Image (cartoon, rainbow, N blue to C red):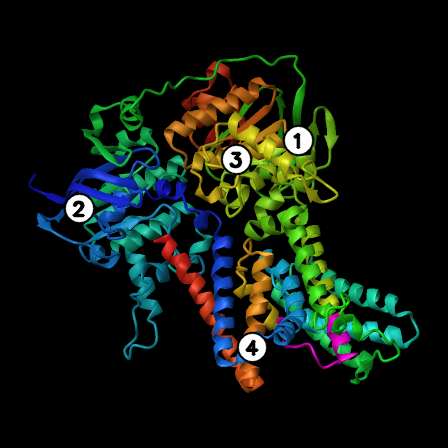
């Protein structure tokens, strides 16, 4: 009988997430080796740091959006919320507020956008895709309106640019942006694996009604989760604007899709209840490793995008096929 | 036998590490209703899946009309007129009845592009007329009752050239009237010479419909007997290989004892009308009635899963406001849903996460989970309720139905709920695990918990309850206590429709 067979699953069957992580980690290593063969400089210290730096913004966004995906939701506004929060932060700074206050306010703006997303989806019953689509349009528009379509510069703060591109550890090339990503990943892991927030995120994603009938205030937790996601977008905005030393109002659209791709390659199921933080980071690394390698080989940005698209198909198709095989 | 349509000989099927079928024999005559019974995991479905081409057999022979056949897929079995209706009906809720029947074989207008809706509806109507059921072919299947959906499945089977119809637990969620109607259709098909394989857990009904009964146990063939010549107890004995004693609940008086739950004038939607009742500590109170009588709706309203318009609820003599499940949980009310998988469990999560789900406040401080504490409790629960699981990290979806039900129960016991509402507590659970669940309910009542049982299986109500409230069309129509609890008295109230 099937059920009997299922009672003694192997370690991978019982922990499908572990298996997935092992596979994509192997894929990442394979990608590194392949590009190392194609261009000898690929695995140099400088280039590895460049890859990590390039991973930072997408990685932070992916960590954020993964929270919503794990609840069987989605947030397609993170790209523009990222921009909107650093525009707000920059405008507050140029209007005379201390930089630290402006930075915190920027992150809070992101969290507020997330809060609205959560409110729309939990309380007003909008599908997350629609709620966050409208938020995407709103923040995209407001970024341009508030900034009057001009970049907002942080040049008055001498150390703002250092926030992302300096090295707090004093190691040359080991940018702060990488450290910020690492710290956020660790915080995410902790929240996800060790706290009620993580437990409820999975519970809501795997069976929302059962969670509600267990006495969990699902609406409130969903709002919290979307706020967390928004705050991550705010932090991504900080890193982004620091790297550019300015907030660019037209940036943003497209970033959400890279982040979702990273989360999905990392093993997050769009139907919720599945996923790991480590997987998200590896997923983001895969994307930036490929982009970097292709750039070294003089492939244009446009072609890079097409290739990443194909990688996404391969990753998800592979995952689906291994799931199907397990069923048979 | 002259008119034998299917013969399966020494069928073996192995899955990695498990012998699912071990030299099973099975024979089916034309115009026969052949019941296939056995506990969950006995191999009934596997055998039927081999017959319908879902699985490939490892060895053995299948003969159809005396000719040896191989069914590499479902289509080839269907071509030979062997069709199975699965327990979880395979219908598309958003399509109409007619569209469902002819899915994949749509009628087209000349030219082959535009669908011929009219002809399709006409053909579907003819099929329904033949079955003598009143279903509009143009109605969306999602708005039909389960019994009607089943008729749509039967009509779909009829639309093929059908020789053998396999029905997996067709009566599991039907009311007695609906079952009677289904049996009428089965008898009609039988009279036309169709052979029917009827898989069922409801042993009481077999005498009514089956000609022969084949019993399976642990992947092996036990025996085939004449349905008229055996008693239910004998069948159970063959199924489990041991005797299970069916005992009635001892009559017990709760007079003068305080009430734990008092419901007064509860109204919620069209299905719950003016419900008032009181329950004691240590009492097992049953809610009987036909499907659709409003029992589940009443339970959901008391639990706050659905809103109620009027009415008061008192817990331990104190009036409480219950607007959400959270309020109910806080007041010690627990609801074990009839649909565990949808409403009770997070299947992709592990045993520990499910058991501690309702009590995370207790197992965490400042939002951080104390795993030592939750593991300690889950381990205790696993031991206390004898949950069969290799570890606390086992995902709940890999557990059997009975063990899943115990996990839900563990969740509520962990929360220290003292009013437990069991909605169809043993649906889809095999005979052995059933009696374990009954024993648990008894133990809990003895510990002073209040147990409310909703069940469509009258034997279950009769066996478990100290007192039974009977509902019909959203109202409580009668109360039966102690020794007076029997089939007739319950059915009398259950059909007492208000003029």
Q: Which residue is mark 1?
A: B332
Element class at badge 1: loop
Residue B179's place in the image compared with B491, above or below, is below
**Start-end of magenta stretch:** A239-256
Between disc 1 and disc 2, the foreground one is: 2
Residue B441's place in the image compared with A47, above or below, is above
Side of B122 where B29 appears, left or right? left
Going from the N terminus, do you reach mark 3 or mark 1 first? 1
Question: In 3D space, how far apart are the residues under numbered discs 4 and 2 (Cα atoms)?
Answer: 56 Å
Return the x and y of residue B108 as percentages of the image width and height.
30, 72
For disc 4, the chain is: A
Element class at badge 4: helix
Are dots 3 and 2 in contact, CB under 8 Å? no
Going from the N terminus, do you reach mark 1 or mark 2 first? 2
Task: Give the residue displayed 41% in from the left and 46% down from the top.
Answer: A10
Q: Which residue is mark 2?
A: B59
Most foreground residue, A127 or B277: A127
Are dots 3 and 4 in contact, CB under 8 Å? no
Q: Which mark is residue A42?
A: 4
Side of B278 where B430 appears, left or right? left
Side of B252 where A163 appears, left or right? right
Side of B191 where A116 appears, left or right? right
Return the x and y of residue B219 as percentages of the image width and height.
27, 37
């Amino acid at each position: 009988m099937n059920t009997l067979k299922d009672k003694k699953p192997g370690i991978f069957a019982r922990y499908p997430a572990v298996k997935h992580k092992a596979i994509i980690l192997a894929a990442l290593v394979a990608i590194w080796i392949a590009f190392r063969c194609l261009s000898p400089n690929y695995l140099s210290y400088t280039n590895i740091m460049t890859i990590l730096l390039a991973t930072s913004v997408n990685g932070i966004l992916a960590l954020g959006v993964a929270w919503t995906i794990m609840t069987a939701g989605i947030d397609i506004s993170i790209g523009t919320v990222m921009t909107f929060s650093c525009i707000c932060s920059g405008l507050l700074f140029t209007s005379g507020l201390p930089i630290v206050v402006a930075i915190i306010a920027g992150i809070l703006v992101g969290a507020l956008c997330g809060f609205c997303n959560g409110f729309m989806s939990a309380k007003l019953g909008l599908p997350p895709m629609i709620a966050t689509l409208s938020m995407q349009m709103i923040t995209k528009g407001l970024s341009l309106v508030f900034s009057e379509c001009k970049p907002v510069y942080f040049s008055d703060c001498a150390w703002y640019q250092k926030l992302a591109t300096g090295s707090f550890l004093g190691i040359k090339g080991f940018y702060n942006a990488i450290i910020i990503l690492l710290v956020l990943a660790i915080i995410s892991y902790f929240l996800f694996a060790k706290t009620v927030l993580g437990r409820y995120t999975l519970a809501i994603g795997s069976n929302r009604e059962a969670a509600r009938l267990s006495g969990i205030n699902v609406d409130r937790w969903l709002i919290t989760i979307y706020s967390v996601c928004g705050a991550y977008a705010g932090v991504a905005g900080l890193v982004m604007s620091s790297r550019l030393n300015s907030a660019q109002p037209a940036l943003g659209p497209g970033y959400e899709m890279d982040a979702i791709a990273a989360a999905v390659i990392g093993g997050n199921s769009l139907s919720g209840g599945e996923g790991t933080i480590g997987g998200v980071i590896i997923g983001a690394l895969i994307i930036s490793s490929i982009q970097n390698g292709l750039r070294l080989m003089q492939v244009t940005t446009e072609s890079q995008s097409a290739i990443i698209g194909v990688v996404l198909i391969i990753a998800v198709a592979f995952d689906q096929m291994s799931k199907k095989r397990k069923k048979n | 036998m002259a008119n034998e349509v299917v013969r399966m000989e020494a069928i073996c099927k192995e899955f990695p590490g498990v012998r699912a079928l071990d030299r099973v024999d099975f024979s089916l005559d034309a115009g026969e209703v052949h019941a296939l019974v056995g506990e969950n995991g006995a191999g009934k479905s596997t055998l039927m899946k081999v017959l319908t081409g879902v699985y490939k057999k490892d060895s053995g022979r299948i003969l159809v009309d005396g000719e040896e056949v191989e069914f590499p897929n479902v289509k080839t079995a269907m071509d030979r007129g062997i069709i199975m209706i699965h327990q979880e009906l395979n219908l598309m809720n958003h399509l109409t009845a007619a569209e469902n029947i002819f899915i994949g074989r749509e009628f087209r207008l000349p030219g082959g592009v535009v669908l011929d809706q009219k002809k399709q509806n006409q053909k579907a109507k003819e099929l329904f007329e033949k079955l003598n059921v009143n279903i509009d072919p143009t109605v969306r299947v999602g708005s039909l009752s389960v019994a009607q959906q089943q008729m749509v499945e039967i009509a779909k089977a009829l639309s093929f050239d059908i020789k053998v119809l396999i029905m997996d637990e067709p009566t599991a969620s039907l009311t007695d009237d609906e079952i009677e109607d289904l049996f009428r259709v089965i008898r009609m098909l039988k009279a036309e010479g169709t052979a029917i394989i009827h898989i069922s857990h409801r042993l009481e009904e077999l005498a009514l419909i089956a000609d022969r009964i084949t019993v399976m146990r642990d992947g092996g063939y036990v025996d085939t007997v004449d349905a008229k010549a055996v008693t239910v107890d004998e069948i159970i004995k063959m199924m489990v290989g041991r005797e299970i004693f069916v005992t009635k609940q001892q009559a017990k008086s709760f007079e003068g004892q305080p009430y734990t739950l008092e419901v007064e004038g509860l109204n919620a939607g069209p299905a719950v009308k003016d419900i008032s009742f009181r329950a004691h500590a240590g009492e097992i109170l049953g809610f009987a009635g036909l499907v659709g009588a409003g029992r589940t709706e009443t339970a959901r309203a008391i639990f706050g899963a659905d809103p109620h318009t009027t009415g008061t609820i008192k817990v331990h003599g104190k009036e409480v406001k219950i607007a959400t499940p959270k309020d109910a949980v806080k007041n010690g009310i627990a609801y074990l849903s009839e649909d565990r998988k949808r409403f009770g469990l997070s299947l992709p999560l592990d045993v520990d996460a499910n058991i501690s789900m309702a009590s995370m406040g207790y197992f965490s401080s400042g939002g951080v989970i104390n795993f030592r504490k939750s593991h300690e409790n889950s381990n205790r629960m696993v031991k206390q309720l004898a949950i069969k699981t290799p570890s606390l990290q086992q995902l709940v979806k890999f557990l059997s139905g009975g063990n899943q039900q115990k996990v839900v129960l563990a969740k509520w016991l962990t929360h220290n709920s003292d009013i437990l509402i069991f909605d169809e507590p043993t649906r889809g659970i095999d005979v052995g695990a059933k009696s374990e669940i009954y024993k648990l309910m008894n133990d809990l009542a003895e510990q002073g918990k209040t147990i409310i049982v909703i069940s469509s299986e009258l034997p279950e109500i009769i066996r478990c309850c100290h007192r039974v409230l009977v509902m019909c069309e959203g109202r409580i129509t009668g109360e039966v206590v102690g020794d007076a609890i029997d089939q007739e008295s319950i059915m009398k109230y259950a059909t007492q429709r208000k003029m």
